[in-house]
Image (cartoon, grey):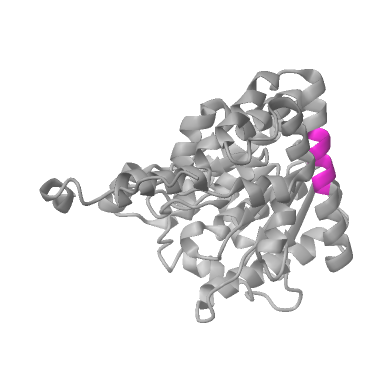
Amino acid sequence: PEFHEMYPTRLHNVTNGITPRRWLKFCNPGLSQLITEKVGAEWPAKLEQLEGIAKYATDATFQKEFMAVKKENKERLANWVKEHMGIELDTNAIFDVQIKRLHEYKRQHLDLLHVLSLYHRILNEPGFECTPRVVFFAAKAAPGYHLAKEIIFAINKIADKVNNDPRIGNKLKVVFIPDYRVSMAEIIIPAADVSQQISLAGKEASGTGNMKMALNGALTIGTMDGANVEIREEVGDENIYIFGLDVEGVKALKAQGYNPFDYYNADHLLKASMDLLLGEEFTPGQPGLLRATYDSLLDGGDPYLCLADFASYVKAHEEMGKQYKDQAGWAKKAILNTALVGKFTSDRSIRDYVNNIWKLEAVHR
């Protein structure tokens, strides 16, 4: 900030963008055709034209067509999972997706804690109503990042148990898709109902996965971090699920002294969920095999405040699960996410660079 005060013209911000040619037109032909029927064929180069489908967000016929495309994409992903991983999925369930590189600040382990909380509640709370969901992870860890690899190991061990526990059935499935890559993202993203963007506030520079999934009609559950802030501005508070501490809240909590044990001891659900990592529920005959993730959140100091945000995160998921049961209401939110994220095209990003940083003149042919 001091440098900016001295030289206010030298620092500029350009919001990231994505190419709609790949991340909608190519990877989601069904939705692309539906959009073209309503707004014409120029939208891939003029993404702001997507706003033209917003007026159909409450149209029952368009809602059914939009959700039918989503169902087809979910079936395509489910077929891939069945063929390559041997896991059968219910495509009527929420497809809850977190796909990005594995890093503690991105908090895949917070997502995993939520999975553990659902598992615990399904088995121990007779009145608990769990909207069926499939939780997808896809990520790679840096070669020397030991804890990241431990988190991947924990996800897979928990998935093995959850997916084969007859007490759970189709209420909860966990899928870790191996060898995450662009071609795999092209299958996952169109199928996502929920986009997990849950990094600790203040740590994400921007991100683009959130843009890709919103463009394809997924609802974001996330913190006030990175491009989530701008997505919220575009789609509106009612069409996104925001939880957790904001940047100032993170600073204040760390300044006063953050002790993860305070949260662990005060929240029965959190404690019960974490304690599952210590036993042999997911590693028969080998108790403590998943302890690295547990230790990082307590003895390791939980540097990315997973425990501080856990209760708010669970509450946001509960609200989202309830709203998913209202398919007409959900369709409206999904359509508006697609309609209102035209700002996030890479064409606009490049124009911002050209006009505000490079100061170039356009070449007219």
Tell me which corner region of the image, top left, top right, bottom left or bottom right, holds residue 342.
top right
Question: Percent position (x, y) of residue 248?
Answer: 31, 43
Residue drawn at 61 percent across, 33 percent down: 337
Q: Nearer the viewer, residue 348 or 341?
A: 348
Question: Percent position (x, y) of residue 279?
Answer: 67, 69
Magenta residue span: 67-74
Question: Percent position (x, y) of residue 176?
Answer: 71, 63
Magenta-colored segment: predominant secondary structure: helix
Question: Percent position (x, y) of residue 323?
Answer: 69, 29
Q: Nearer the viewer, residue 344 or 158?
A: 344
Residue drawn at 50 percent across, 31 percent down: 234
In the rendered image, the vertical position of residue 147 relative to residue 34, given as above or below: below
Residue furthest to the left in view is 6
Along the horizontal axis of the image, is 147 left or right of 115?
Answer: left
70 in the magenta segment: yes
Along the horizontal axis of the image, is 253 left or right of 51?
Answer: left
Along the horizontal axis of the image, is 72 left or right of 290?
Answer: right
Tell me which corner region of the image, top left, top right, bottom left or bottom right, holds residue 288.
bottom right
